[in-house]
Every structure is written in C-alpha cells, then in structure tokens.
Amino acid sequence: MYIKKILLGVILIGLCIAGYFAYFVYSAMLAPNTAFESDKEYIFISSNASYDDVRAILEPLLEDIDGFDALAKRKEYVHNIRAGRYAIEKGMTNNDIINTIRSKNLPVKVSFNNQTNIENLAGRISKQIEADSASLVAVMHDEVFLKANDLEKLRALQIYIPNSYEFFWNTSAEEFRGKMLKEYNKFWNTASRSKKAEALEMSKKDVMTLASIVYEESKQKEEQPRVAGVYINRLKIGMPLQADPTLKFAAYQLPKYKNTIIKRVLNVHKEINSPYNTYKNAGLPPGLITMPDISAIDAVLNYEKHKYLYFAADAQRLGYHKFAKSLAQHNINARAYQRYLTSQGINR
C-alpha cells in the first residue's frame, strides 16, 4: 500500500512536470505573442547588434518578452544574431519570430535619381541601406577601385545608373559599390550599347559624359536624341559644344556661386576659366556634370541624324527647344527666349 502511494505520488509529480513543460512549450513556442494591430511590422537589425539590442527592438512588439527570452536562449539565438530587415506578422509565435529573424532577411528596393555628385548619391543611398554616407563616399572615391576599373575621381559617378535595385538592408558600402559595378557592366552588355558606342567611335566614358549634358539640356525623352544629334554634329566638325549646362556646372564649383541657382546663363559665365567651360574648350569636358538618365544615355547611342547645329529653349513650349541649321536662324530663336526671360524678371 505504501509503495502504491509512492508510485502514485511519483506519477502525479511527473504529470505536473509534464503539464508545466507542456504549458511552457505552448506559451513559449506555440502561443501567439505579438502586441501590434497592423498586419505586420518591419524590424531592422544592424550588423553589430547584440541580443540586448534585438530584445529592445522586439519588446514593444511582443506581449511577453520573457517568454521570447526563454526560447531564444534555448534555441541559442542569443549567440547567433543575423543582421537584416525582417517582417514580424501579427499572431506569430516566439518560434515563428526566431525562425524569421534567423533566416528570412528581406531585400529592400533601393532607388536613386539623378545626383550631381558622389556626396549627394551617398546621402541618398544611406537613407535606404545600413551603410552610412561617409563609408559610401570613401569607397566610391577609393583610388585603387577607380584605377582598377579604368575610372578617375572626376568620373566616379559614371558607374551608378539611376534606377531601382534590390539589396539587402544590411549591405555594406563595399557590397553596394560592387553590385553597382556589376549592374553598370550588365547595362552596357544589353541593347547592343557597347557596339553602338564603338560605332560612334566613343568610349563608354565619353557616351556617359555627353549623356549627362544631354540630360541637363532636356528632360523630354522624345527630344533627347535630337539634342544629342546636335552635339555629335558639333563634335564631328570640331565645333565647341557651347553647352550652357557645363557653364553652370563650372560656376557651381566656385565659392561665388555656392548655394545659388543660375536661371539665366550670361556672358560672364562664358568667361569662367574651367575645363568644363565648353565655350572656351573644344571637345567633351573631363567628366560627368550630373548622373544621366538611361533615356539620355540611349539618346546618345541612338542619336537622331540631322543637320542641326544649334538649338535654343522654346518660350512658347517650355521644356522644349527650337532647332536651327544656321547661326542666323539660331540667333532669332535665342533672342526670342532671352526676351521671354526678361519679361519674367529672370536676369541671372
């Protein structure tokens, strides 16, 4: 009888232990443990994050952070933190959450439009991935990288084609630069772009530089091939490009014009001593004046064949231009636009 009582006690204790263990398994692993109302919340875990950092990120999103702690320790997640962007869905269990932040790093869409310099580009990118602006600028200007890829500092912007790309949020500056170089090479290997540049007897650098001028001259995609054709006609006969956007670029490098906007190109700008002054210097400037759109690059590669040598902004159709074959006709077009600027009180 006494032995039966002992056995019964042992069984009851075992059942209690099993019940507690079952409760622990359910509450720690199988019970929903989210405290937000939205369908999902995104969290960002940095590359140098500790478990305490992850815990602090998750705590406002969970009903029971202690239960999460217990399972995280049991599954050894506390010693195996993975950086990235993760989606925590409403109703997830602790087990779901740990499995997610251990292996389901989500990519982000990184987009950038036309930036005038590396610093601006780095600032834009640093808002979308983990790498900070300073580290991005450093690797983009790295002389060893530039030399290895036949680039110079003035052309460092060349390999970054405005578009949307997929990256993991925890991408480093070096990884970002490396992928953009691959995308740049892929860009030139599609649509016969490299062959078209060879047919023009222009290097990729030259195409990109001319495209940056075309883009600054006209944002109208249907007009860009005609603008490109004017510049190519000038290059063929040794005529200076006389591109106003290059004068603005040259001016903005001077302290006098910092934090200003030049709305009207004047004769004083044509006297600026700079290799980017295409009124004084024949041929292409030494580097890009901005990051050109794909449309502008393709406009150069597929330029319109015509006999125009001049163009001036069209006062009756703002954003577009009037084209001319003769200087006399161009002067008429240019004076019409100058009168429009004066009528609008735009004097500088």
Image: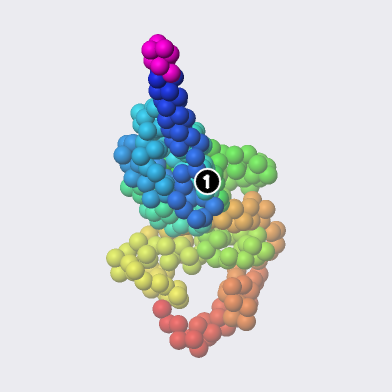
Q: Position of residue 10 (x, y in %)?
A: 40, 18
Residue pictured at 45% horizontal, 29% vertical: 19
Residue pictured at 67% horizontal, 64% vertical: 222
> Mostly what secondary structure, the magenta segment?
helix
Which quadrant is the C terminus positioned in? bottom left
Q: Dot 1: few (<14), some (14–19), or many (≥20) neighbours within 10 Å?
A: some
Q: Nearer the viewer, residue 124 or 33?
A: 33
Name the residue at the front extreme: 1
Taking the image as shown, residue 334 lies to the left or right of residue 125, namely: right
Name the residue at the bottom extreme: 343
Q: Magenta part of the protein: which range?
A: 1-8
Taking the image as shown, residue 300 lies to the left or right of residue 52, namely: right
Q: Position of residue 61 (x, y in %)?
A: 42, 49
Residue pictured at 40% horizontal, 16% vertical: 5
Q: Is residue 87 magenta?
A: no
What residue sits right under mark 1 in the picture? Answer: 91
Residue pictured at 60% horizontal, 70% vertical: 311
